[in-house]
Image (cartoon, rainbow, N blue to C red):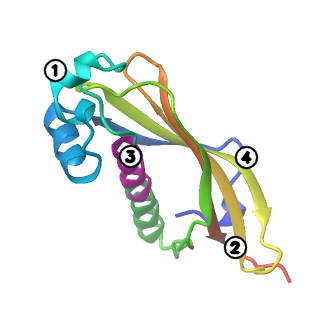
């Protein structure tokens, strides 16, 4: 993971991609979002989605999985270079969650994250706060998912 000082506005990370199969969509929906258009191809075709659609929460959960995996890769790379990896703090939340287009069975979504703002914490000089927009784009280049996340990021050289 990166330290606050290592980040720049506009810095983009490609997080990876995921193909949503009918089986994955139904399994997730059965446990967490059991709406008809997530559970049945026929019901999905009859819906506004026009096909078996992944739950938006499923699309978001995959994004989180890939964000964590990317952080783990960054930490491993830092350790391999003989550096101490940054250990990020919790997230104070997210905003502007958008499910822009349906994710249908067979769609492959590529995820990315781009830094939008960086600010020093006023009450905790050892931390900075990053806001980054996470996005998901389907195989046709269409933006299907977006949100802005905030996270506490340790500072390498705390002010104060």
Q: Nearer the viewer, mark 2 or mark 1?
A: 1
- Counting from the top left corner in percent of width and height, residue 8 is at 71, 50
- Whether 98 is drawn above or below 142: the answer is below
| Magenta stretch contains residue 109 | no
Which residue occupies the foreground of this view, 159 or 36? 36
Q: Is residue 117 left or right of residue 45?
A: right
- Whether 127 is drawn above or below 143: the answer is below
Q: CA distance from mark 1 to mark 3?
A: 21 Å
Q: Nearer the viewer, mark 1 or mark 4?
A: 1
Contact, mark 2 vs mark 1 (Cβ under 8 Å): no
What is the quadrant of residue 88 in the picture?
A: bottom right
Classed neighbour count for the residue bearing mark 4: other residues with Cα under 10 Å, few (<14), some (14–19), many (≥20): few
N-term mark: 2 or 1:
1
Q: In this view of the protein, can residue 20 be seen by the observer?
A: no
Outermost residue, right direction?
160
Q: Which mark is residue 42?
A: 1
Residue at 24% in and 23% down: 44
Q: Secondary structure at mark 1?
A: helix
Which residue occupies the foreground of this view, 104 or 50? 50
Outermost residue, bottom direction?
160
What is the quadrant of residue 122 in the picture?
A: bottom right
Contact, mark 1 vs mark 3 (Cβ under 8 Å): no
| Magenta stretch contains residue 61 | yes
Outermost residue, left direction?
23
Identify the residue position indicated by label 4 in the image.
9
Q: Secondary structure at mark 2?
A: loop
């Amino acid at each position: 993971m990166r330290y606050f000082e290592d980040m720049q506005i506009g810095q983009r990370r490609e997080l990876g991609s995921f193909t949503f199969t009918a089986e994955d969509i139904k399994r997730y929906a059965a446990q967490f979002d059991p709406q008809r258009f997530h559970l049945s191809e026929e019901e999905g075709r009859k819906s506004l989605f026009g096909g078996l659609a992944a739950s938006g929460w499923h699309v978001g959960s995959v994004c989180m999985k890939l964000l964590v995996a990317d952080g783990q890769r960054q930490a491993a790379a830092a350790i391999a270079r003989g550096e101490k990896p940054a250990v990020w703090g919790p997230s104070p939340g997210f905003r502007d969650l958008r499910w822009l287009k349906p994710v249908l069975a067979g769609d492959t979504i590529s995820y990315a994250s781009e830094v939008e703002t960086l600010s020093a914490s006023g009450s905790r000089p050892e931390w900075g706060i990053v806001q980054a927009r996470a996005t998901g784009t389907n195989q046709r280049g269409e933006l299907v998912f977006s949100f802005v996340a905030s996270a506490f990021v340790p500072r390498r050289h705390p002010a104060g």
